[in-house]
Amino acid sequence: MLPFGNKAGSKAIERIVTIVTPQEAFLAAFSLHPAGVAVITGRLDDGSPAGFTATSLASFSADPPRATVNIAQHSSSYPALALGKKVILHFLSNDQVGISRTMAGDFSQRFAGDHWSPGLGGLPQLHGVRGALLATVSAVTEVGDNAAIVFDISDGETHPENEPLVYVDRRYHGVGDVIED
């Protein structure tokens, strides 16, 4: 019998995990689930830039084009995601680990530097990303201390020559070989 999730001939990843609570099971399972790394940027009511790193960005529907992300309501960037606000959804390239860390770090330092400039819709736009979508917040659903945000997409650009950045196992990764077309 092969270890769970491994194929014959592949290197097995050995782990000993004792699951005690549903939260521990949740954290363990999602740490093993690869996610693209994104940054959402917008503006606060005073016009200052706001943004954060997210691995929960996902498509919501293709027609009309919509996306969704989850965020803690106590996040410093949460006020930039009010209903009707415009934002840019950035899909990071595999050489942007530093930007991911910056945008997840100290709020006062997220826009210090030359990694961004005013872009789509006059909003803070990161340079060198794989893709960027201009969006408007169309729904906010607060659940407990968190919120699910839905965005309507109105414009965008892609740069497929840039390889994607992925986060899994609490580490950054590039994308591996194509297994099947």
Image: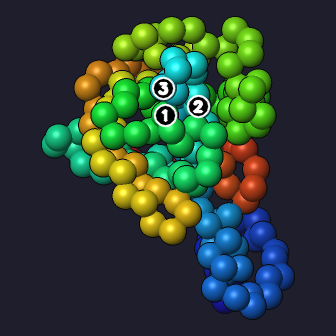
Disc 1 to disc 2: CB gap under 8 Å:
yes
Q: Which of marks 1 and 2 is in front?
A: 1
Residue 46 percent location from the top left of the image: 52, 20
What's the residue type where badge 3 is placed? Asp
Disc 3 to disc 2: CB gap under 8 Å:
no
Residue 80 percent location from the top left of the image: 49, 34
The residue that label 3 is drawn on is: 45
Residue 152 percent location from the top left of the image: 27, 37
- Is the N terminus in the top left, top right, bottom left or bottom right quadrant? bottom right
User: Dividing the picture into quarters, in which one does residue 101 lie?
Assistant: top right
User: Dividing the picture into quarters, in which one does residue 143 lie?
Assistant: bottom left
Measure the alpha-carbon separation of dots 1 and 2: 8 Å
Which of marks 1 and 3 precedes in the sequence? 3
The residue that label 1 is drawn on is: 80
Residue 8 appears in the figure: no
What's the residue type where badge 1 is placed? Ala
Residue 157 percent location from the top left of the image: 38, 19
Measure the alpha-carbon separation of dots 3 and 1: 7 Å
